[in-house]
Image (cartoon, helix red, strand yellow):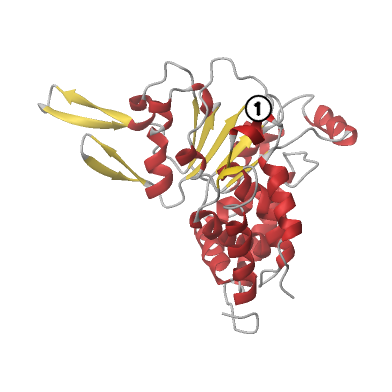
């Protein structure tokens, strides 16, 4: 599909996106692209890993998104003693009916906040892997489908490592994007103080778009046009990570697929019906860097995956 072809879902989708952004921005005060990128991953059908210190608004952002679309929302505080059944659910024997009855866990929701995910054991972390990868979970040999809008917002503290378990590469690869919220400006922080003198603005937020409109936006994102040259640019960027100095394991084809879908979603959010190389360049770091594994020498030398991806962006030829 090219930019000249009719794309009937684009206009209503962009109208819905505008309402959703304004609703979230009425609660959140951000000095970077966190809202844009969160919506990008959400409408691309991916999941998000937020790395930031406590108190920067990660939970508020997740709740604002859920409240703005009347989605079901669950929050799980990950701790070292958390068990997989605490997330997935468990079968309980019903004495009256003399049979086991499945009691679903908090993972059966539309938006899940996995708070401090790296504090749980790898066994518990892996409980999310099948749900994020296949939109279903297997419990006691039986498959349970997830909601079609299932969206995970996981958080971890990038500073405190005591009592944490690093996320394995397979888990990291299932996150469409990783980024930080960051601190707000002085002016925004003053507005935060004023807005919360009596109550939290989150309490007054109301749904502004329906779940059907969310589905429309997701379908519209897949209609955003992308030229073969732009697709080739994505492939070249991803392939460059596989032989770049300092990288032990480069990005897989899944990274390219994710970058393509996120680029389509962000282009739609920005009001465009086609993808430009500039959008690819903006999303390269948050969609690729967390999937890379650096070799020991590079890590000891202080190399950073995000810097390497930024270097790759400057090195790979841009299509014209």
- On the question of residue 208 being in view, the answer is no
Q: Where 96 sits versus 104, above or below?
A: above
Q: Is residue 92 left or right of residue 152?
A: left
Pick whichever, 162 or 75, lies toward us.
162
Q: What count of labels does the image hold?
A: 1
Q: Is residue 255 left or right of residue 21?
A: left
Q: Quadrant of residue 202?
A: top right
Say which residue appears at 45% left-offset and 41% top-offset: 170
- On the question of residue 75 being in view, the answer is yes
Name the residue carrying label 1.
Answer: 158
Quarter of the figure that contains the N terminus: bottom right
Location of residue 308 in the rendering, given as x and y in whole percent from the top left corner: 70, 46
Q: Dot 1 lies on which element?
A: loop
Q: Residues within 10 Å of mark 1 (few under 14, many from 20)?
A: some
Location of residue 39 in the rendering, given as x and y in whole percent from the top left corner: 63, 51
> Which residue in the rendered view is the most extreme toward the right?
187
């Amino acid at each position: 599909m090219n930019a000249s072809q009719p794309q009937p879902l684009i206009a209503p989708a962009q109208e819905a996106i505008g309402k959703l952004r304004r609703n979230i921005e009425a609660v959140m005060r951000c000095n970077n692209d966190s809202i844009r990128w969160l919506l990008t991953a959400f409408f691309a059908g991916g999941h998000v890993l937020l790395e930031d210190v406590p108190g920067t608004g990660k939970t508020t952002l997740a709740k604002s998104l859920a409240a703005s679309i009347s989605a079901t929302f669950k929050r799980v505080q990950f701790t070292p003693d958390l068990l997989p059944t605490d997330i997935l659910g468990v079968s309980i024997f019903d004495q009256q009916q003399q049979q086991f009855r499945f009691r679903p866990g908090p993972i059966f929701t539309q938006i899940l906040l996995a708070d401090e995910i790296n504090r749980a054991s790898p066994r518990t972390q892996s409980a999310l892997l099948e749900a994020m990868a296949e939109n279903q979970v297997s419990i006691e040999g039986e498959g349970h489908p997830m909601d079609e809008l299932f969206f995970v917002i996981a958080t971890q503290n990038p500073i405190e490592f005591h009592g944490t378990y690093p996320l394995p590469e397979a888990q990291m690869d299932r996150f469409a994007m990783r980024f930080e919220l960051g601190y707000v400006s002085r002016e925004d922080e003053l507005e935060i103080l004023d807005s919360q003198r009596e109550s939290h603005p989150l309490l007054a937020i109301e749904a502004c778009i329906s779940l059907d409109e969310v589905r429309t936006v997701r379908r519209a994102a897949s209609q955003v046009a992308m030229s073969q040259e732009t697709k080739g640019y994505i492939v070249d960027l991803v392939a460059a990570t596989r032989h770049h100095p300092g990288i032990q394991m480069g990005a897989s084809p899944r990274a390219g697929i994710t970058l393509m879908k996120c680029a389509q979603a962000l282009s739609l959010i920005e009001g465009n019906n086609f993808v430009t190389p500039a959008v690819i360049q903006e999303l390269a770091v948050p969609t690729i860097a967390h999937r890379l594994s650096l070799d020991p020498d590079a890590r000891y030398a202080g190399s950073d995956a995000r810097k390497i991806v930024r270097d790759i962006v400057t090195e790979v030829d841009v299509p014209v």
